[in-house]
Image: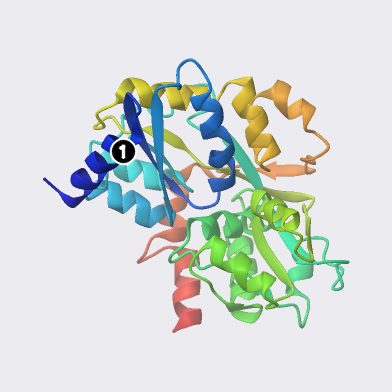
């Protein structure tokens, strides 16, 4: 028996629940899961289910599940981390065939600045002004970094129609303004809060959480930005498919959608979204991964380890 299986059995014996399921997730949505899991346990379908959580960097979590880390559901930063599990036979090929394409909540790329916005940052062009230092994690290690860089790339390339214009912007940004390259989105937030940089490119939900902690920051939603879609899927090789599926389906209930919104994430239920419209401003243009052709096009083109245009920029910038 593997060390993962032994650990899981010990947890299950200690739980006292009729069944337990393990959620393996990236770190950013932890505040939302902390709110939603008790609500699920208070529901009829979740009252006898213990939800065990594991948080970490999205790519590391995905590779861990492939290597045998126990998981009944996965919630990752980017779709390619789910695709890895589909290829490994651990997630169904039709995992995203539902109405929301496997996305139970979302966010947008935003700009976090110091309280009072002393550098008068309003939009993407302001990040390239002389003397402006930008914090964003490296896409070599971070899923959130991919979303962060897709935002200005989509804006400047007009949805990929002028690829070179998008690459030129990202190249100038990285070479001249990104001096620190933390390993994850959470590390990037910590570095910024501790005083480094003038602007942090981040998830809107991460910015909201940081503001609620009383940090001296504020966030600005650019007139054009990018829709962040963080997928959730059931691991079909898990031993509690019914409970895992019930937990996944619970995320789309009005009660859970409201909790996600209260935790700083954009709900996918239109009725709940309408109730929180003041918290989540609608940009003039919200680009999506579909506008760029989907992850099957974007990942190899921009982020492939050997040939991706943005990966190459980072490799050259870091030597």
Q: Which residue is mark 1?
A: 14
Q: Is residue 46 above or below residue 50?
A: above
Report whether residue 303 is seen: yes
From the viewer's perspective, is 8 left or right of 247?
A: left
Residue at (62% x, 73% y) in the render: 191
Colouring style: rainbow
Residue at (24% x, 28% y) in the render: 239
Residue 164 in picture, x, y percent from top left: 59, 63
Report whether residue 29 is seen: no
From the viewer's perspective, is 71 left or right of 261?
A: left
Q: Nearer the viewer, residue 44 or 82?
A: 44
Residue 87 placement: quadrant: top left
Residue 204 in picture, x, y percent from top left: 68, 50
* Classed neighbour count for the residue bearing mark 1: other residues with Cα under 10 Å, few (<14), some (14–19), many (≥20): few
Residue 83 in picture, x, y percent from top left: 35, 42
Quarter of the image for the C terminus: give it: bottom left
């Amino acid at each position: 028996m593997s060390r993962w299986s032994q650990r899981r059995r010990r947890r299950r014996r200690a739980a006292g629940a009729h069944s337990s399921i393990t959620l393996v997730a990236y770190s950013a949505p932890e505040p939302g899961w902390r709110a939603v899991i008790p609500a699920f346990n208070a529901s009829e379908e979740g009252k006898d289910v213990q939800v065990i959580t594991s948080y970490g960097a999205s790519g590391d979590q995905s590779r861990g599940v492939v290597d045998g880390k126990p998981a009944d559901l996965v919630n990752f930063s980017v779709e390619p981390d789910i695709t890895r599990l589909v290829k490994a036979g651990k997630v169904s090929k039709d995992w995203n065939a539902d109405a929301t394409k496997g996305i139970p909540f979302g966010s947008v790329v935003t700009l976090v600045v110091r309280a009072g916005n002393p550098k008068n940052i309003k939009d993407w062009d302001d990040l390239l002004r002389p003397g402006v230092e930008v914090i964003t994690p490296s896409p070599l290690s971070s899923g959130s970094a991919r979303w962060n860089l897709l935002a200005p790339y989509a804006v400047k390339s007009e949805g990929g129609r002028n690829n070179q214009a998008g690459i030129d912007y990202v190249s100038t940004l990285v070479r001249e303004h990104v001096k620190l390259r933390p390993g994850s989105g959470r590390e990037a937030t910590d570095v910024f809060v501790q005083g480094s940089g003038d602007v942090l490119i981040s998830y809107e939900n991460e910015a909201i959480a940081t503001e609620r902690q009383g940090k001296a920051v504020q966030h600005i939603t650019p007139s054009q930005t990018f829709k962040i879609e963080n997928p959730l899927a059931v691991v079909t090789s898990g031993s509690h498919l019914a409970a895992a599926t019930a937990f996944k389906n619970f995320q789309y209930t009005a009660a859970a959608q409201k909790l996600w919104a209260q935790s700083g994430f954009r709900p996918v239920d239109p009725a709940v979204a309408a109730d929180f419209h003041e918290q989540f401003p609608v940009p003039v243009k919200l680009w999506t991964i579909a506008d760029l052709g989907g992850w099957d096009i974007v990942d190899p083109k921009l982020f492939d380890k050997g040939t991706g245009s943005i990966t190459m920029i980072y490799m050259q910038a870091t030597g």
